[in-house]
Structure formats: C-alpha cells, structure tokens
Image: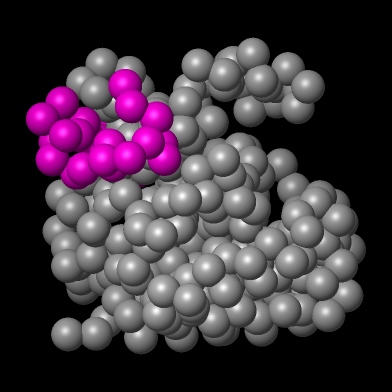
Amino acid sequence: MCKVGEGGCGLDRRDFVKTGAASVAGLTVLGDLGVVAQDKQPPTRVLDDPRVKHGKVMFKHAGKETFDGYLARPKADGVFPGVLVLPGNVITEEYIPNTCAALALAGFVGLTPNVFHPLPSNDTPMQERGKYLKEHTIDDVLEDIQVAIDYLRTQPFVRSSGFGALGFCWGGWLSLLSAARFRDIRAVVAFHPGIGRDREELSQVEVPVQLHQGTADTSIEPKTAIQIRDTLAARHVPVELFMYEGANHGFTAYTREFYRPDFAKLSWSRATKFLSTHLNAK
C-alpha cells in the first residue's frame, strides 16, 4: 500500500467502492458516554434536544471488519447536507456525539467514524494505545473516513452533492487530508489542527477552509494554524483563521478542563455559518 504523501498515490473513492466498503446497521440508543462532572448543564450540550435523532451506527470495513460510528440528524423530515466529525480522541468522549447533535440542530447530518477502532476498549490507557494503533496506518484511517463518506451517500436523508469535514486536533489535520484526498469534501472546519508528516498534501487542498485556534494552546503551537492559513492562502485557497485570546486546547469541549463556553458558542456559530454557505450552495 502506498503511503500518504508519496507522489501520485492519492486514494480515490472508486478504489474503496470496489471493496464494498460501506454497509451499516440501524441507529441504536445513546450509550454510556463519560463526561466531566458539571455544576450545571454546559451551555453547548444539546444531546437531550428532542429535535434530534441520534445514536450508534456500525460499518463493515472492506467487507469483513466491523467498526462503529455515531450519527445525528434532524428528527424532522427532509434532506440535509452531511458533515463528517473527525475526532482527536475516542468518539465516546461526549463532546464528539454532542458535536454531531449540534450539527443536526443546525440543519446538517453529523457522522463521526471511529478511527480508533483497533483499540481493545475505549478505556485503553493513553500509554498503551500505540501498540494497538501502530499497524493502523494513515491510509487505513483515511479508508475509514471514506467508508463513512460512502455511508452518507446511501442515506435518503443526506444530500449527496458533497460533504463537510469538521475536526479537532489530529482530527483537524485529518479533515484537511480528507479534502486533499477525496473530491466529495467541499468544505473544511479545523479546530487547533496539527500538521502531520504528510504536510505536502496541503498543496492538494482546494476547497474553502476555516481554522479555529486558541492563543494559549499548550498542546498545539498556535503558530501552526497560521502556517496552515498562509500555505493555503499562497495557493489562493479560500481560508480564514479565527484566534481566541487566552484559550487553551479543547476550548470547545465541555468534557475538558479548558472549556470556554463563550468561545465555544462563538466558534460554533462561525463554523455552522461557514458550512451552510458552502454546503448549501447550488
């Protein structure tokens, strides 16, 4: 298998369709998702909103290996743009399905594929994860994402004219790689993305990109988002970057200690407006 970043070996949707990549079981009820104790309901938590239908989905990977995901859609009838939610951590951290639900409230179908499915459990200690994930290459992860794209294409309530990718941290980088690899991706929103070893693939990104970055991020250098913006802008790719003064890593996640509800709400309003502009365009 060719590696990401090697010249002329971009993965194409047709390669995955040949494998019979995506099949799915029905939605199930929301599972037990751990959450940091709160004195009151976090203002950006919407998982209990009755206007949203959401739950677990199961995929068949390459026709044989099963992995899971999480989908949320408006309960009302209609056909809606699809948005992939690409996590930097396991999808059972509650703010990830909550992000899918918040997308549903904003008029989208949110789907997160479990790109960490090789882990034996969601509670696998961080220091032990490497041995389970080392054989799951970046190409394998992008294939998981393609499986999710193919699934969205089959759903009668999803508009099939192109999808958004919204990611956090490593998932932010995955959202950019997805735009570089897959012509199905029409817009990208990336929160505090890093740059992987495949940085040359930024030259393949041609769709509009919106970046969000805290100035006090202790996990990802804030200047990384600036570098991504400047690289894309130099190629005349539509790109915008919003910096949040004093915000640390994960400021949108109410499950994290650095949660900033003010910036979480502001960045979310910007993200959903951006996605609506580019995914609802004729």
- Can residue 275 be seen? no
Viewer-side residue, 208 vs 262: 208
Viewer-side residue, 143 vs 57: 143
Q: In the image, 43: left or right of 158? A: right
Q: Residue 181: x, y in percent?
A: 32, 49
**Residue at the spot x=30%, y=61% of the render?**
185
Residue 103 lies, with reference to residue 66, above or below; the image says below
Residue 261, image quadrant: bottom right
Q: Identify the magenta region.
A: 1-28
Residue 32, image quadrant: top right
Residue 1, image quadrant: top left
**Residue at the spot x=18%, y=53% of the render?**
153
Question: Was residue 17 drawn as part of the magenta stretch in this picture?
Answer: yes
Q: In the image, 232: left or right of 179? A: right
Q: The C terminus is located in which quarter?
A: bottom left
Residue 268 lies, with reference to residue 142, above or below; the image says below
- Can residue 32 be seen? yes
**Residue at the spot x=41%, y=60% of the render?**
203
Q: In the image, 160: left or right of 227? A: left
Viewer-side residue, 41 vs 210: 210
